[in-house]
């Protein structure tokens, strides 16, 4: 989350180096905060989705890794991609419900097609990148800890 907030600041500072017109980062972040306040239902839905799905998918991933000895990298990466897809589905449903009020059934289907056309590629790209990086990092950490546990918990010879 911090990266998402820092990247626009870095881009704005770099942008100010090459152009005489000064853009205000305070204005950018105040506009961002106003968008969050205008879309409370969307933000709450995304937050609740994460709060519900992280323990469910995390427990399932732990079960696959510990009991069934599945590859840590694969299970970790797929778990994060599934989290992104859960966020995507909750985004579609929230947007469709919000558009149904003012635009009726046409707004419902418009929101769904818009999210499928423009949102799905972004969620897939971010989900795959996030899944690959975190799957690798978490997988290597689990392997390192597993190796440490093997060397520190030796059974005495009888």
Image: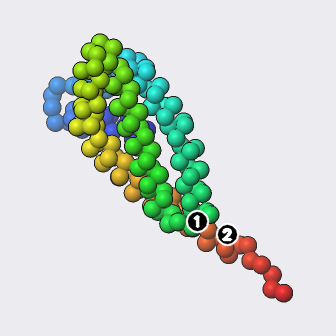
Q: Give how far apart the Cα atoms at labels 1 and 2 are.
A: 19 Å
Task: Give the SS element for disc 2.
Answer: helix
Crowdedness near tag 2: few (<14), some (14–19) or many (≥20) residues, C-alpha within 10 Å: few
Q: Which residue is mark 2?
A: 149
Image position, residue 85 (x, y; %): 39, 43
Camera-nearest residue between 46 and 149: 46
Is residue 157 depicted above or below 93 in this figure? Answer: below
- Placement of the C terminus among the 4 image quadrants: bottom right
> Quick check: 75 left or right of 129?
right
Task: Give the SS element for disc 1.
Answer: loop
The furthest residue to the top: 102
Is residue 123 depicted above or below 109 in this figure? Answer: below
Image position, residue 124 (x, y; %): 32, 47
Camera-nearest residue between 97 and 145: 97
Is residue 126 depicted above or below 52 in this figure? Answer: below
> Quick check: 41 left or right of 68?
left
Q: Which residue is mark 1?
A: 68
- Residue 36 in view in this figure: no
Tell me which residue sits at (43%, 20%) in the image.
40
Image position, residue 63 (x, y; %): 60, 57
- Residue 76 in view in this figure: yes
Q: Quadrant of residue 22?
A: top left
Tell me which residue sits at (67%, 74%) in the image.
150
Tell me which residue sits at (41%, 49%) in the image.
81
N-terminal-most mark, 1 or 2: 1
CB within 8 Å, label 1 to label 2: no
Q: Quadrant of residue 24?
A: top left
Is residue 118 depicted above or below 22 in this figure? Answer: below
């Amino acid at each position: 989350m911090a990266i998402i907030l820092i990247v626009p600041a870095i881009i704005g500072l770099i942008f100010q180096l090459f152009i005489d017109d000064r853009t205000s980062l305070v204005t950018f972040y105040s506009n961002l905060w106003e968008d969050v306040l205008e879309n409370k239902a969307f933000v709450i839905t995304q937050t609740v989705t994460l709060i519900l799905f992280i323990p469910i998918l995390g427990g399932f991933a732990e079960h696959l890794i510990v009991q069934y000895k599945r590859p840590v990298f694969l299970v970790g990466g797929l778990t994060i991609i599934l989290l992104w897809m859960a966020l995507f589905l909750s985004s579609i449903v929230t947007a469709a419900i919000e558009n149904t009020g003012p635009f009726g059934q046409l707004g419902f289907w418009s929101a769904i097609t818009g999210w499928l056309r423009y949102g799905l590629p972004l969620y897939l790209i971010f989900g795959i990148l996030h899944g690959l990086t975190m799957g690798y990092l978490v997988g290597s950490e689990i392997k390192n800890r597993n190796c440490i546990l093997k060397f520190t918990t030796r059974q005495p010879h009888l």
